[in-house]
Amino acid sequence: MTAIDDVSVEISVVLGRAVMPIRQLLKMGRGAVIDLDANIDSMVKIYANNRLIARGDVVISGDRVAVTVTESVRDYQS
C-alpha cells in the first residue's frame, strides 16, 4: 500500500444546471422533471473536488451510465 492509496477525491459530473425558487423545488414530487440549461448534444463537466478538470460525453452501456472523457481542462477553471 502506498501513500496515494489513502487519498480521496470526490468526482462530480454535471449534466446541466437549473435555477428555481425553493418553494417550487419543495412542491415537486416523484417523477417531476427539471429543465436544465443543456441539450442532448451538450458535453458534461467533470469536477474533482469542485474544480473543473475535464469535459466529456454521456455513454449508455446496457443498464449502466458512464462518461467518456473527451477534453482535459488544463487551466482548472470552471
Image (tube, rainbow, N blue to C red):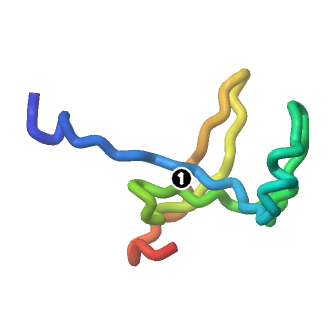
In the image, residue 7 sits, relative to residue 25, either above or below, namely: above
Q: Mark 1 highlights which residue?
A: 69
In x, y percent, where is residue 12? Answer: 52, 49
Q: Quadrant of residue 15?
A: bottom right
| Rendered image quadrant of residue 49 | bottom left
Q: Quadrant of residue 23?
A: bottom right
In the displayed image of the protein, which residue is found farthest to the left?
A: 2
Q: Is residue 11 visible?
A: yes
For numbered disc 1, what is the local secondary structure? strand
Q: Residue 58 placed where, x, y %?
A: 68, 46
Residue at the extreme top of the image, as rendered = 63
Position above or below: 9 against 72: above
Q: Is residue 38 visible?
A: no
Decide which of 29, 56 is in the foreground and name it.
29
For image coordinates 83% across by 60% down, the residue present is 39
- Amino acid type at image mark 1: Val
Quarter the N terminus occupies? top left
Q: Seen in the image, is 38 located left or right of residue 6?
A: right
